[in-house]
Amino acid sequence: NQNGGQPMSTTMCIVQLFLFLGLVPTMMVAQPKNDPLWKKAMELHRRAIVIDTHSDLTSRIVDEGVDIGKRLPDGHQDIPRMQAGGLDAQFFSVYVAAKYAEKGGPKRALQMMDAVYRAVEKYPDKLQLAVCVSDVYRAVAHGRIAALMGLEGGHGLQNSLEVLRMFYRMGIRYVTLTHSNTNDWADSSTDQPKWGGLNELGEKIVREMNRIGMMVDISHVSDDTFWDVIRISKAPVIASHSSCRAIANMPRNMSDEMIKALAKNGGVIMINFASSFLNPQWGERTNYILQQIRDKYHGDFGMWDKMWNEMNAKNPVPPATLDDLINNIDHVVKLVGPDYVGLGSDFDGVSNLPVGMEDVSKLPWITYKLLQRGYSEEDILKILGGNVLRVFSQVEQVAAEMGSTGE
């Protein structure tokens, strides 16, 4: 947890713990504040470097003008709730919508990046810009939240390696190769394929990302694109906000074969918190709507809410739960071990969060639930943030090695 630029005192931690517990009275009944396991969870959570690799709070700053320094009445994130949830590092999504694919992508990305810079400038005692692993550790040591950035939607590069390199210099540390749309060099999981994965330009972009030290993010991409990335990349890759297809069968999630290949590559899948990604019922409905949007409505995601609301009015789906989220973590760990899974919330980018994970202040419940299921403290520290820090460090190392060999 962070408070005013300095590590919090034990007293302050206890005060904030009580405040946090007061926000969730229904949970207090099930798990009273004197539960020894809860106390152990909070102590472990404070020791961890807790990292979320995907939040769309940036879009709210740009489009709604929200002040994230104040406790907002809606949404999933702001600085007070980040502190209450013990969040240490946040990758802010520099989201470029598909409508900018032909024109204006880099400008939109710059607006998003500027919003992150301005937030850091406005709250220097609470946020610290981070562009490397050592920056994350430095921010945590000073009691600040490390603010990192990832570009969501490779079309925002406007097919330019020069733009890619400049975005890296400005602080972008991963690129999600596609969003919901297939672009000029990579196929998306939720659009008609054009290239059978990556085309020649797509391969060049992945290689250049390896060379400069930028993480390759395969969330949103088609299966063929994923396999091309695994074949080409010299560095571990990430899925910044995806879950398990074996549990929720929809194309945005990863199959067991993909998760195994990702682990062999050394990469990490960060579990998406949206209900749509977490259990069979939600996955089935989401998959149906995605197919309709792709095949019947020509990729018009403006139909999403209308279709969802109509289906839910006729046949409501019970909300997903925190246990559904933990089940996805469990699935990855049982499949490939604890070194290849992390957290990618999609906070403020989705509307259907599970019961028990309504906003960022609830993050300690993940630690509690993992302890409850018998996870070791070492493995929990990896899942909460250690795994993605390892990948980030390895990506930096690969870039240094490629630079030294002149590749």
Image (cartoon, rainbow, N blue to C red):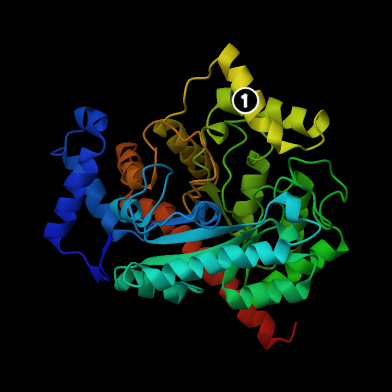
Residue shown at 24% from the left, 71% from the top:
6
Dot 1 falls on a residue whose secondary structure is: helix
Q: Position of residue 50 (x, y in %)?
A: 38, 57
- The residue lying at 20 percent from left, 52 percent from top is 16
Q: Which residue is mark 1?
A: 308
Amino acid type shown at disc 1:
Trp
Q: Is residue 305 left or right of residue 79?
A: right
x and y percentages locating residue 212 in the rendered image: 66, 77
Residue farthest front in this picture: 65
Q: Is residue 233 visible?
A: no
Q: Choose between 347 and 271: the one closer to the eye.
A: 347
Q: Is residue 356 above or below residue 127?
A: above
Judge by depth and name the residue closer to the eye, 129 or 65: 65
Q: Position of residue 321 (x, y in %)?
A: 42, 29
**Residue 268: image location, x then y, percent:** 55, 54
| Relative side of 246 to 320, left or right | right
Q: Viewed as shown, does residue 115 lie left or right of 291?
A: left
From what the image shows, is residue 82 above or below residue 33?
Answer: below
